Amino acid sequence: MDTAEVLSSLALVIIVVSLFLVFFIFRKSKENVPPGSSGWPVLGENIKYFWLGPQEFIKQRTEKYSKDAFQTSLFGERMAVFCGPVGNKFIFANETKSLASWWPLSVRKAMFFPEFVGSSTDDVSSLMFCSIRDILKPEALKQYIPVMDSMAREHVESQWAVNEVVKVFPLSKKYTFGLGCRILMGVVDVELVTRLAKHFNLVTVGLISVPIDLPGTAYNKAIKGGKLVRAELMKIISERRKEMLENKLETGNRSDFLSRMLLLTDENGKFVSEKEITNNVVGLLFASYETTSSAVTFVLKYLSELPHIYDEVYKEQMEIAKSKTEGELLTWEDIQKMKYSWNVVCETLRLMPPALGGFREVANDLKYAGFTIPKGWKTLWTVHSTHKNPKYFADPETFDPCRFAGNGPAPCTFVPFGGGSRLCPGREYGRLEILVYLHNIVTRFRLEKVSPQEKIALHFLSVPMEGLPLRLIRHKL
């Protein structure tokens, strides 16, 4: 090939590349995606996200790019982060239209069977949503309040009352996981619950680590823990199905979520597979366990720091306690009297939300605030764009339960449970669980913080680094 041919070929390549770049730039301009940064190749902005924590990460980018939405790259995905109450409302309103539920691949890989990892989260969790709402409706949950109270009393007596100092976070996890096993699966065997909790803890710890699947890493342990959890659940489910078949599919006195799931059939009239049920139970345990434990922990943290708030909660709870006869368990009516206590819980969830928010996948191109969010992108709505924003909550760092009196905050500004069609179905379950636990602790102890400078890790979940050690001061009889 002579010089002229080389130059000619080079010119052609330059023209083709130039046309491609012009097309790409034009297309990008036409799409007008939200401003932002995709970070480093492959790594995206994961390192910055983990380093800064979600609150600071989102604050910095809304200030730099846009208060409405910005783009980033997390978990290997192009992602649009929606901000403010308008962004929250937009996501909640479009969840059944242009958005599908989505969890990062790293989460699915740790929690679900390998053959389901590539499925959409809607496919994996559709059974859960069609059944869980029934069992977790307030009218259905009323029957579980005495169970919650009985378990809380036993737990406080055996795990709290025998100690001068307790670590709240691990103890609250022990209680919420045991309660979840009891109510969701009808499992009460202490050894089995302990074994399940041990495996499950590997999963939850690994999910808030950098998702690198190499031997010895926390994420690798999470994948192994998930496998052990699924194996245990498959045994439980297989035995329960056999038991129910031998009893001609009658659930008897069982009203737990698992028993109802075992009666579900697909469009062909066949029973849902045990692996599908296992995936749903894993997701449900995850949702009901770690977040509730975190919420309980931080409620008690604020009560130990703010005596005037504690006194009001104690007064309310003691009025209820004094109205009961000896040994009488809490009822639905008692829970409805805990109005100030619930406001304290809500203010805790505002300041220390146990979860980041929610991911979705764009099924069809979305138009929002003048931007286009292309099909295939992922979206994130987050509590961190409103919960501490002085525009929506005056003096946002001050703990003030009165914010939730009367009509409460403006719509879509307080969103610890999400909203719209995917409003957390476990919201009422969590409310009852937290208030019952709070009642059993506050009526017995005043709380004193042992480690005032304890640091809080803020990634997917809010976690006290030392487990929140508190000194227990027993009330005088």
Image: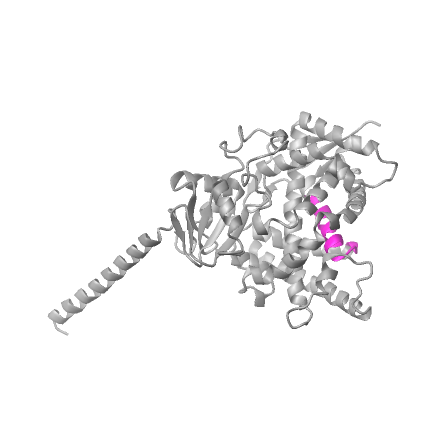
Is residue 1 at least partly visible in the picture? yes
Left or right of 51, for residue 295 = right
Question: Could you tell me residue 446's position as x and y percent?
Answer: 74, 30
Left or right of 35, for residue 477 = right
* Magenta span includes 51: no
Q: Residue at x 77, y 45 (%)?
A: 145
Residue 458 falls in image quadrant = top right
Question: Could you tell me residue 207's position as x and y percent?
Answer: 57, 52
Question: In the picture, which quadrant includes the N terminus?
Answer: bottom left
Question: In the picture, which quadrant includes the C terminus?
Answer: top right
- Towards the viewer: 34 or 215: 34
Furthest residue toward bottom: 1
Q: Which residues are magenta?
A: 170-190
- Towards the viewer: 157 or 23: 23
Furthest residue toward right: 326
Left or right of 14, for residue 2 = left
- Towards the viewer: 91 or 146: 91
Q: Residue at x 72, y 39 (%)?
A: 435
Q: Is residue 97 above or below residue 176?
A: below
Question: Could you tell me residue 285's position as x and y percent?
Answer: 67, 54
Question: Could you tell me residue 183's position as x and y percent?
Answer: 75, 53
Is residue 450 at least partly visible in the picture? no
Q: How is the image coloured?
A: one colour
Left or right of 211, for residue 14 = left
Q: Is residue 11 above or below residue 401?
A: below
Chief secondary structure of the magenta portion:
helix
